[in-house]
Image (cartoon, helix red, strand yellow):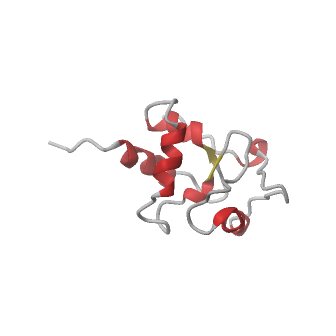
Amino acid sequence: MEKEKTVFGRIYDVVRSIPKGRVATYGQVAAMAGNPRWARVVGYALHCNPEPGVIPCHRVVNRDGRVSAAFAFGGENAQILLLRQEGIAVGDDGVVDLSCYRWYPEIV
């Protein structure tokens, strides 16, 4: 019998699936993990990311496309740098244009 994943485990699975060069919002990750009301829980989970190089938490932004001022692994400047290294344009105001870079997974 397969062990059921924790809420954080489900969140990490979603975040791992965000492709390079794309972003998702906290609410989008929450909904895909099983509950659209978990946006804050997504933030908590990403703040204690156990595998920063594997779980790309830098690809998660708020509903307006803004990077996190509390990015756990070096602050918002580190998040901006990581996104730009993936080819994502981030404005000087720390905002990603969601109409260009938001990830829309294929529905199977």
Q: Residue 29's spot in the image, x, y percent?
A: 53, 41
Give the image location of residue 82, x and y in percent. Answer: 66, 67
Residue at the extreme front: 70
Q: Residue 49, relative to residue 34: is it above or below?
A: below
Which residue occupies 58% across, 55% down? Answer: 19
Question: Which image quadrant for residue 27?
Answer: top right
Q: Disc count in the image? A: 0
Looking at the picture, tell me which residue is in the foreground, 86 or 38.
38
Q: Residue 95: image x %, image y %?
A: 78, 51
- Which residue is depicted at the point 69% across and 45% down? 102
Q: Which residue is drawn at 62% across and 69% down?
A: 74
- Tell which residue pokes out farthest to the right in this image: 92
Is residue 106 or residue 7 the one in the foreground? Answer: 7
Where is the N terminus found, in terms of image quarters?
top left
